[in-house]
Image (tube, rainbow, N blue to C red):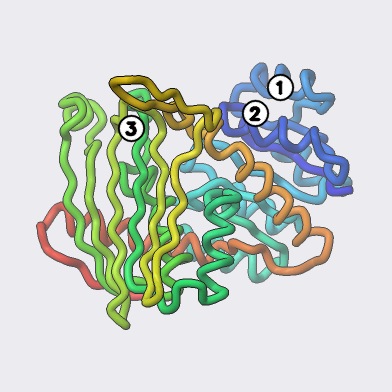
């Protein structure tokens, strides 16, 4: 049994908490939030207790922390948890700055505790099956990866202003998938960014809402990523990998596979409407991976070093979109 304390009682925190209490190998002991009343409400609903950071980190019964707070607090909470000897599950990204991520990596190494970063899409059953077949050589050597990631609509504009921007908040998942599927670190990034969905994204959110990106590895493998904050038909999540012997594709998931055929047209369900429904299985599966690493004392499947390498791609994409030129990655 792995005993957890949850930091963050918002939308993501609640989802993780509900996944935890469904498990037989984990127990939620505490919920911590900057709004104690929110922490108390979530904790009481799930049989846990509301607490503060000091209480959680000093309690020897707490084996692990799950950090689902706002991004700006991820690294500091992770460092404090590492120093307290707690295993760490941290939502992406660890931080918006390279210096802070490296400080966190150093603290985790010194404490010798497992730290897992929540790039949940690697745990989607379809994407994971694609990766397994890719690694088995089904399509030969990888040549191109195409990633489509389109949100159904804009988040709150106040969130955009503090999110770190499209590349750090949104494309960050695609950069992780690109590294995972290419099997090599990208060495060059070219990015176009634009505001095509809502002009307030630029004026109020200080951000962009649409992007296309190209990545290249040292051996010449390529990846194309396309992003938008508006897809009126649903949450569009697709991957194609082209290899020397063929192609692997993971298509959109829909609530049902029922199709209607009439004289004029054929139609089926739209894709799932949001990330909570589309990646429900992935969020549950990543907890399984983390808990296994805690129980077996093995390294986490997605360590904080991966977050560092993804952040390098995010920073390069931002510079490229601002300069209109490709940017080389310096590890």
Taking the spot 33% from the left edge, 62% from the top edge, the residue there is: 313
The one nearer the camera, 131 or 10, is 131
Residue at left offset 25%, top offset 57%: 317
Label 1: element kind? helix
Label drawn at residue 200 = none
Task: Pinpoint residue 171: horizontal percent, then vertical percent.
Answer: 36, 49
Q: Which quadrant of the view contains residue 262?
A: top left
For residue 298, say whether it is visible: yes
Image position, residue 212 (x, y; %): 22, 50
Disc 3 or 1, which lies upstream in sequence?
1
* Residue 268, percent from left and from top: 43, 27
What residue is drawn where x is 63% and y is 41%? Answer: 281
Disc number placed over residue 42 in the picture, else none: 1
Earlier in the chain: of badge 2 and badge 3, it is 2
Left or right position of 198 against 308: left
- In the image, 225: left or right of 196? right
Residue 135: quadrant of the picture: bottom right
Q: Quadrant of the C terminus?
A: bottom left
Residue contact between numbered discs 3 and 1, judged by CB atoms under 8 Å = no
Which residue occupies the extreme front position in the image?
Answer: 263
Q: State if disc 2 and disc 1 touch (CB < 8 Å).
A: yes
Disc 2 target residue: 14
Location of mark 3 (residue): 160
Mark 1 vs mark 2, CA separation in Å = 7 Å
Q: Nearest the camera: 22 or 87?
A: 22
Look at discs 1 and 2 and give the one toward the viewer. 2
Within 10 angstroms of label 2, few (less than 14), some, or many (20 or more) residues? some
User: For the residue labelled by badge 3, is the local secondary structure a helix, a strand or a loop?
Assistant: helix
- Front residue of 323 and 256: 256
Q: Secondary structure at mark 2?
A: helix
Whole-number angstrom distance, CA of label 3 to CA of label 1: 26 Å
Relative placement, left or right, of 282 versus 222 is: right
């Amino acid at each position: 049994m792995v005993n957890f304390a949850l930091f963050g009682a918002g939308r993501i925190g609640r989802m993780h908490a509900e996944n935890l209490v469904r498990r037989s190998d984990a127990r939620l002991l505490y919920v911590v939030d900057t709004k104690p009343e929110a922490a108390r409400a979530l904790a009481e609903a799930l049989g846990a207790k509301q607490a503060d950071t000091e209480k959680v980190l000093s309690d020897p019964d707490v084996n692990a922390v799950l950090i689902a707070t706002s991004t700006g607090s991820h690294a500091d909470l992770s460092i404090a948890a590492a120093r307290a000897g707690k295993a760490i599950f941290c939502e992406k990204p660890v931080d918006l700055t390279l210096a802070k991520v490296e400080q966190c990596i150093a603290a985790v190494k010194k404490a010798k505790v497992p730290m897992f970063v929540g790039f949940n899409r690697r745990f989607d059953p379809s994407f994971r099956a694609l990766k397994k077949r890719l690694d088995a050589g089904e399509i030969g050597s990888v040549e191109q990866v195409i990633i489509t990631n389109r949100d159904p609509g804009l988040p709150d504009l106040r969130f955009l202003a503090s999110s770190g921007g499209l590349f750090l908040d949104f494309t960050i998942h695609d950069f992780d998938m690109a590294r995972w599927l290419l099997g090599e670190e990208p060495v060059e990034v070219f990015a176009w960014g634009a505001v095509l969905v809502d002009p307030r994204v630029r004026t109020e959110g200080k951000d962009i809402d649409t992007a296309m990106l190209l990545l290249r590895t040292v051996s010449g493998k390529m990846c194309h990523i396309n992003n938008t904050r508006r897809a009126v038909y649903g949450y569009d999540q697709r991957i194609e990998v082209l290899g020397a012997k063929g192609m692997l594709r993971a298509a959109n998931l829909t609530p049902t596979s029922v199709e209607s055929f009439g004289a004029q047209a054929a139609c089926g369900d739209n894709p799932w409407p949001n990330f909570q429904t589309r990646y429900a299985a992935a969020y549950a599966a990543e907890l399984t991976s983390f808990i296994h690493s805690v129980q077996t004392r093995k390294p986490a499947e997605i360590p904080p070093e991966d977050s560092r390498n993804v952040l390098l791609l995010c920073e390069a994409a931002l510079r490229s979109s601002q300069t209109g030129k490709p940017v080389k990655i310096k590890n």
